[in-house]
Image (cartoon, grey):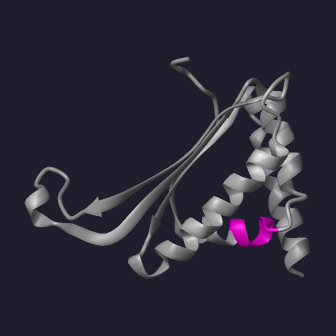
Amino acid sequence: MKKILVTIILSLISTLSFADGHSNANGFAITLKVPASDVEKVEAMLVSHYNWMKETHPMTGDKKLNSYSIMKGPEWNNPADPSQGMTGNMYFVLNEFYENPSGFANHQELGSKWSKIQEFQTMLFTYVVGYAFPGTTIATID
């Protein structure tokens, strides 16, 4: 049942990604807000994703992965006044950007075959607080 659900979700995401003029999408960014009790397991899953990306995604050619990053930082009670301390939650920002839309499409195809895709998507859907998906890169510094 889980495999069917994941397949449906991936199909929907893929369809939506290229609908309504989004055919130029070449990446995405997603922000997760994670309670302190779950930070270790989320970070481990993100590292697993990073390792899978390194092993499977082209770094040259038409489908090139131009940039991949995972950022981590604390949530402040009041960002304008650090003396008020932190909440204990951690933000993670995952960002991927490809040479062109065919690289982004390749990522979606490869992702559907990753052995940990169900676990990864469950994690994303549990903690997501914001995303640009599909996204179109508007500026980079090379």
Front residue of 18/124: it is 124
Decide if residue 125 is on the left or right side of residue 16.
Answer: left
Front residue of 93/52: it is 52
Looking at the rendering, which quadrant does residue 27 occupy? top right
Residue 100 in the image, given as x and y percentages of width and height = 76, 24
Tell me the residue at 8%/61% (across/down).
83
Looking at the rendering, which quadrant does residue 64 occupy? top right
Looking at the rendering, which quadrant does residue 103 occupy? top right
Vertical comparison of 122 with 59: above or below: below
Front residue of 83/7: it is 83
Write down the region rendered in magenta: 116-121
Magenta stretch: dominant secondary structure: helix
Q: Residue 132, can we see it? A: no
Residue 44 in the image, given as x and y percentages of width and height = 60, 69
Tell me the residue at 17%/59% (across/down).
78
Tell me the residue at 47%/73% (across/down).
39
* Residue 117 counted in the magenta span: yes
How many numbered dots are placed on residues in this image?
A: 0
Decide if residue 137 is on the left or right side of residue 121.
Answer: left
